[in-house]
Image: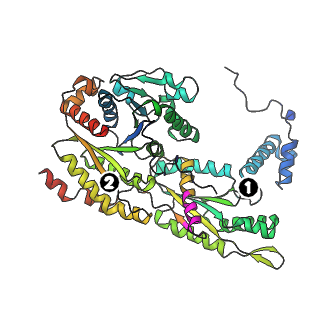
Amino acid sequence: MTAPEASTTMSSAPLERDRQKTASIMAVTSGKGGVGKTFLSANLAAALAAQGARVLVLDADLGLANLDVVLNLHPKLTLHDVFTGKATLEEAILPAPGGFSVLLAGSGLVEYSRLTPQVREQLESVIAQVSPRFDHILLDTGAGISDVVLHAVSLAHEVLVIATPEPTSMTDAYATIKVLATLQQRRHIRLVVNQVSSAGEGRTIRHQLQLVVDRFVAPQLRSQGSGEPLVLELLGEIPIDVAVREAVQKRSLLLLKMPGSPAAQAVSAIAARMAR
Amino acid sequence: MPAKIDPRPADSNALSLDGALQLLEQSGHALPALDEAGRAAWLQAVIDGLCELSSRDPLTGLANRRQFELTLASEIDRVARAGEPALVLMIDIDHFKKVNDEHGHPAGDLVLKAVAAALRDCIRPMDTVARFGGEEFAMILPNCQPSFGQAVAERIRLRVQATTIAIAPGADVSVTVSIGGAFAPQWVRSSPLLWVERADQQLYRAKSQGRNMACLEHQTVSWVSPEEKGLLFGTSQFQDFE
């Protein structure tokens, strides 16, 4: 029998971060797909970059993310080429329109949607290598609660769950929060509520999620032997905004094309809160 | 591009089978008579015999680790598609080193065989029990409801505990096992490695909490109950919007 390793398993506690030398790694996840995960990752990266930070967005969905579509990039070299030795990491890190860097997985990695030990190790080693060179690394994870997503999240210091006020999205966000708390011992989870129709809706949803967490998840955590409560932090809410759809259709970054739009301002406010 | 290889040997007389036949004979594997079966069927029996050999643990006759990992991978596909929960148990003999130290390695082998037999007695036909390595065993239980998991693991633990093992004439020993278990959550794409790792962590917990114990991971939580939904979409939220 082998004792479990502490740092690299998907059930591990959040990583401790050496603030001096390495990037802050944040996983962006959602439970339900189509709630704006990649939109947020890309625009948040641009907003952080606009504040002077060095930012990398990594497609941690292993080729299923739409980062290239959102950013209108046609990468010749991807993480897949790095893993297979066809390219160096340097070559695969691409500049994105918003002044940040991206590392795309490439569709060749879809075959790895089952997480092999090799892919795990390679992903971890890539993150370790790029970490000293950035202030923020955003991991754009897949939808659902697969082991691939859980593993990607386990590599991050912070995790951000994005949801919309839609009941299915809230249910999936709650399920994700529950899994992250019980399997990964997460006690602090950031929340962004997208597509709110009135100011303060995000606060209400955070409150509602926290209520269910306190009632149903906290007892489980206590029975696992941890009395530390799980705290959901509302990082911000993004209003429904026609500008978002326009930007998506033009395959351009909202923050660049329509920086004055309410949604862009909301994303900038989220970035400012993260930088604090 | 290399030429496509025809898997059928042009001349099967050119095959060198001495090593294979020796292995099969040593393991007591019977082959059909060559002249009765015909050459193709006989060769197929040789290949089947080798496959069987390479998937079994020689000491206990259980599936070996290779076979276990194959089964686990296909079980993951099934769980992800069919949504039936499946349980993996990691089972480790407590203080096995003491058996070896006090009674010698032949006794240790007898204990491994007896535990293997006890485990085999506990399973349903569709289950897989394997020797994972050393004194560690592993089980895959497809379509096992989470609410039954603890009872199943407990039954295995008690079955082993109740087994007396004759290691020499007039000398009986018994051993206990620690068990760790984890479910592959329904509909969730998993990986063999992480699944086993989760079960292993529960085994570690069983060991550190005193051994002779079955610890299962708290039912994986991706499921949201009607009560949880009720609270999530409770009246307060919608009142706030009005």
Residue B122, image x, y percentages: 62, 68
Mark 2 — on which chain does it sit? A
- How far separated are the C-alphas under marks 1 and 2? 48 Å
Q: Residue B161's image quarter?
A: bottom right
Image position of A100 with respect to B128: above or below: above
How packed is label 2: few (under 14 Cα within 10 Å), some, or many (20 or more)?
some
Residue in front for this viewpoint, A174 or A18: A18
Mark 1 — on which chain does it sit? B
> Going 83% across and 34% down the picture, which residue do you hit?
B12
- Spot the residue most to the left: B242
- The label on residue B57 is 1
- Pair 1/2: label in front: 2
Q: Give the range drawn in magenta.
A: B201-214
> Going 27% across and 36% down the picture, which residue do you hit?
A272
- The label on residue B157 is none
Q: Does the magenta stretch include residue B121?
A: no
Question: Badge 2 is on which residue?
Answer: A231
* Element type where label 1 sits in the image: loop
> Going 53% across and 55% down the picture, which residue do you hit?
B198
**Along the horizontal axis of the image, is B32 left or right of B197?**
right
- Spot the residue most to the front: A20
Q: Residue B154's image quarter?
A: bottom right
* Element type where label 2 sits in the image: strand
Residue type at numbered disc 1: Asp
Q: Is residue B210 magenta?
A: yes
Residue in front for this viewpoint, A210 or A127: A127
Residue type at numbered disc 2: Val
Residue B137, image x, y percentages: 65, 60
Contact between marks 1 and 2 (CB within 8 A): the answer is no
